[in-house]
Image (cartoon, rainbow, N blue to C red):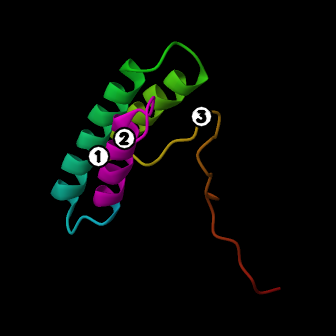
Amino acid sequence: MGFGKNPYVAKAQAAELKATDAPDAAAASRAYREAAHEWERAAGREPPGKRRAEYEQNAVQNRALADGEGPSVEGEEPASTPSTPRSTLN
């Protein structure tokens, strides 16, 4: 690790990877919560600005994943499904 690098970014990324490779939902939830914690620690070491806001958003997303909510992208609407199935026959 070089001078000036934020060590918590690598730890948060490793925890996210661990969550995606988790064998069950409980292990994934714990790993996502750990990732969120590390992202908050990373944000705390950054001065206010774009990078800090990005790390804070990563923490929020990981907490949502830990709570069983799907990944959310800011400004994106959920996909709508048609209420009636469409027939492919003419």
Q: Earlier in the sequence, mark 2 or mark 3?
A: 2
Q: Choose mark 2 or mark 3, whichever is in front.
A: 2
Q: Which dot marks residue 62? A: 2
Residue toward you, 78 or 10: 10
Q: CA distance from mark 2 to mark 3?
A: 14 Å
Query: For mark 3, what is the residue?
Result: 74
Does the magenta run of residues contain 46? no
Q: Quadrant of the N terminus?
A: top left
Residue toward you, 80 or 42: 42
**Neighbour tally class for label 2: few under 14, some 14-19, many 20 plus, Cα within 10 Å:** many
Query: For mark 1, what is the residue?
Result: 32
Horizontal side of 20 relative to 33 (left or right) equals right
Q: Label 2 amino acid?
A: Asn
Horizontal side of 56 relative to 31 (left or right) equals right
Q: Label 1 amino acid?
A: Tyr
Q: Position of residue 33 (x, y in %)?
A: 25, 40
Q: Residue at x 63, y 41 (%)?
A: 77
Query: Magenta span covers which residues?
Result: 1-19
Q: Is residue 55 above or below residue 21?
A: above
Q: CA distance from mark 3 to mark 1?
A: 19 Å
Q: Position of residue 74 (x, y in %)?
A: 59, 34
